[in-house]
Image (cartoon, helix red, strand yellow):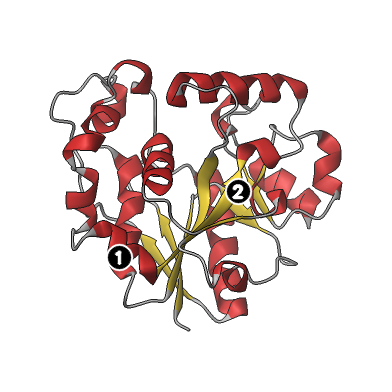
Amino acid sequence: MRRLIFQVAVGEVPWFYHPCMNSAQRYADRIGAHYLRLTEPMLRIVPKKSQRSENALRLGYLPIFEKEHGFSYLGEYDQVCILDADVYVRETAPDIFPLAEVFDFAGVVEQDLPLQEKYERKVRNYAADQYGDKNRRFYNMGVTVWSANVLTYLNGQTPKQFIERPEFEPYVNGEGKYRWSTDQTLLNTWVASENMHQRQLDWRWNCMYDYVVPTALHLNPYFVHFALASKMPRGGAEIPDIIAGLA
């Protein structure tokens, strides 16, 4: 099977994410997958009636949706793993692709993480706000695997046409409760509405640093996701030191 690991590094990419991206490239080499890092925007998604902040559109487009350019490689590749730029892949991580081989989509449900109590509350509040149900289980879209079967659900559309579907306009515009949303709510809603064949991966494939209890980092997580880097004491500059401690 042909497999691709896809990452996006457009716009202002903090220097401390480079060790994370380099780890993903090494991982691809190790497991025999291809690796592609997008450094120039391809989709340039712009809200039709933006309710987002001025800062969100500082590049003239919404960079978070550039990740969906990864869908354009489905068909050329049997599976595409889309990784956020702030995900560190440990040298001991096994091959993720076989786990998702017979599924349309695979990811980690945030509620399955060994969360700190304050983040358990945050996740419940987020679910209630974004999906109208505090008990709604949802995937963190920082680590995902998509199979070529997803082309069926794209209905012949390009990634840009997909994001610009009328039903997704509230998410792209940032209307109301979606003002600060990324692509996560859009993709969770889409995966559920299409009733895709899903694989809920073990939490170790997306160990969200600062969300999990400290002991979780001693339980051999495979991918460590620095999703709250900007809120760290040094604004994320400590990530290389943390990575060194994980080795």
Residue 161 vs 91, above or below: the answer is above
Residue 97 occupies which quadrant of the picture? bottom right
Q: Secondary structure at mark 1?
A: helix
Residue sitting farthest toward the top:
176
Q: Which residue is mark 1?
A: 151
Residue 147 vs 49, above or below: the answer is below
**Residue 186 at x, y percent in the picture:** 36, 38
- Label 1 and label 2: CA atoms lie apart by 21 Å
Q: Quadrant of the C terminus?
A: bottom right
Query: What residue is drawn where x is 54% and y is 38%?
Result: 138
Task: Give the residue type that dot 2 points to.
Answer: Val
Task: Give the residue type that dot 1 points to.
Answer: Leu
**Residue 198 at x, y percent in the picture:** 52, 56
The tag on residue 108 is: 2
Whether residue 60 is visible here, answered yes or no, is: no
Query: What residue is drawn where x is 53% and y is 71%?
Result: 102
First in sequence, mark 1 or 2: give its number: 2
Q: Residues within 10 Å of mark 2 (few under 14, many from 20)?
A: many
Say whether residue 78 is left or right of residue 241: left
Residue sitting farthest toward the left:
48
Q: Secondary structure at mark 2?
A: strand
